Image (cartoon, rainbow, N blue to C red):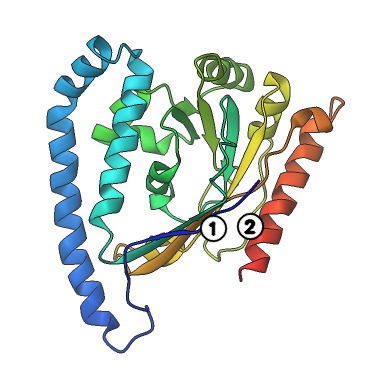
């Protein structure tokens, strides 16, 4: 896959002497604007949804996924004064659905950076707790996201197949929870077994810098340089046999680990 570099925004170095005032300014800027941006999108949703259904003629799940994707892109635009973003490996039209996308996990905001993905039709496979966030959970359900803690594997596979049949992607964070060290944790097998059983490719993405932006256990945002790198796609057909999904898991994890080590 060919790669391109695209930087957006400017962010002073996080080690500069003025970092504490900058952090304070960032949080005074970001949190109120995030609240207003969220409120705005909640209010416009009925009009947006009606337009999407009647004019664009999309089904309810794809309408909601487009809505969430646009919300995420807007949030990233609000962060431009403090977050420098780099995207690599997204050229060449390699992202044809259906596919499983797997991403390493560093921050609550990792999902927001999926707004930079060139296609919007993505359903996230997540644990149960985000579904309990009052406003966000409702949109996750409407978008057809997979609650992988509540669903058994057969239910998850059936839900993923519905996404694939409608030309979409299913996004997994195979570590299951955020890394506190930046190092890769153990990968769960669900994403790879779904890709293997459904016969769809796996697209690994490597995200860096979101742990600096907002790592686990911290409430204050910090200026950061964030990168999202798309690695070459894996074809599950290259990993045959009943345990092929396990070999696929190991290969994808090794590719992500290699990229993280190369950029350390």
Please tell me whether mark 2 sits on a helix, a strand or a loop.
loop
Q: Is residue 164 above or below residue 174?
A: above
Q: Position of residue 105 (x, y in %)?
A: 52, 51
Assess whether mark 1 and mark 2 are in contact (beta carbons under 8 angstroms): yes
Q: Position of residue 240 (x, y in %)?
A: 86, 28
Q: Position of residue 170 (x, y in %)?
A: 53, 30
Q: Disc 2 designates what residue?
A: 184
Checking the image for residue 155, the label placed there is none
Q: Depth check: give the residue in front, 24 or 163.
A: 163
Relative horizontal placement of residue 108, taking residue 63 as reference (left or right): right
Tell me if mark 1 has few (under 14), some (14-19) or many (20+) residues whose alpha carbon lies within 10 angstroms of its own.
Answer: some
Q: Depth check: give the residue in front, 180 or 104.
A: 104
Please tell me whether mark 1 sits on a helix, a strand or a loop.
loop
Q: Residue at x 16, y 48 (%)?
A: 35
Q: Disc 1 designates what residue?
A: 179
Q: Is residue 140 above or below residue 229?
A: above
Q: Is residue 175 above or below residue 179?
A: above
Q: Depth check: give the residue in front, 26 or 190.
A: 26
């Amino acid at each position: 896959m060919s790669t391109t570099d695209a930087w957006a925004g400017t962010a002073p170095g996080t080690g500069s002497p003025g970092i504490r005032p900058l952090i304070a300014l960032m949080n005074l800027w970001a949190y109120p604007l995030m609240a207003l941006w969220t409120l705005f999108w909640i209010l416009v949703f009925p009009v947006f949804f009606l337009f999407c259904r009647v004019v664009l003629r999309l089904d309810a799940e794809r309408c909601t996924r487009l809505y969430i994707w646009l919300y995420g892109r807007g949030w990233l635009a609000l962060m431009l004064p403090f977050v420098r973003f780099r995207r690599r490996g997204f050229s060449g039209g390699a992202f044809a659905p259906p596919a499983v996308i797997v991403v390493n996990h560093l921050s609550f905001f990792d999902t927001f950076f999926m707004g930079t993905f060139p296609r919007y039709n993505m359903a996230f496979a997540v644990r149960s707790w985000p579904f309990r966030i009052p406003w966000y959970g409702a949109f996750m359900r409407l978008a057809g996201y997979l609650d992988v803690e509540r669903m058994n594997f057969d239910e998850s596979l059936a839900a993923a197949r519905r996404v694939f049949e409608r030309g979409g992607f299913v996004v997994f964070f195979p570590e299951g929870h955020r890394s506190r060290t930046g190092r890769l944790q153990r990968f769960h097998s669900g994403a790879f077994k779904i890709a293997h059983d459904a016969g769809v490719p796996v697209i690994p993405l490597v995200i860096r810098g979101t742990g600096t932006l907002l790592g686990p256990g911290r409430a204050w945002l910090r200026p950061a340089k964030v990168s999202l790198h798309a690695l070459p796609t894996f074809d599950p057909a290259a990993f045959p046999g009943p345990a092929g999904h396990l070999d696929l898991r190991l290969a994808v994890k090794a590719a992500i680990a290699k990229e993280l080590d190369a950029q350390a």
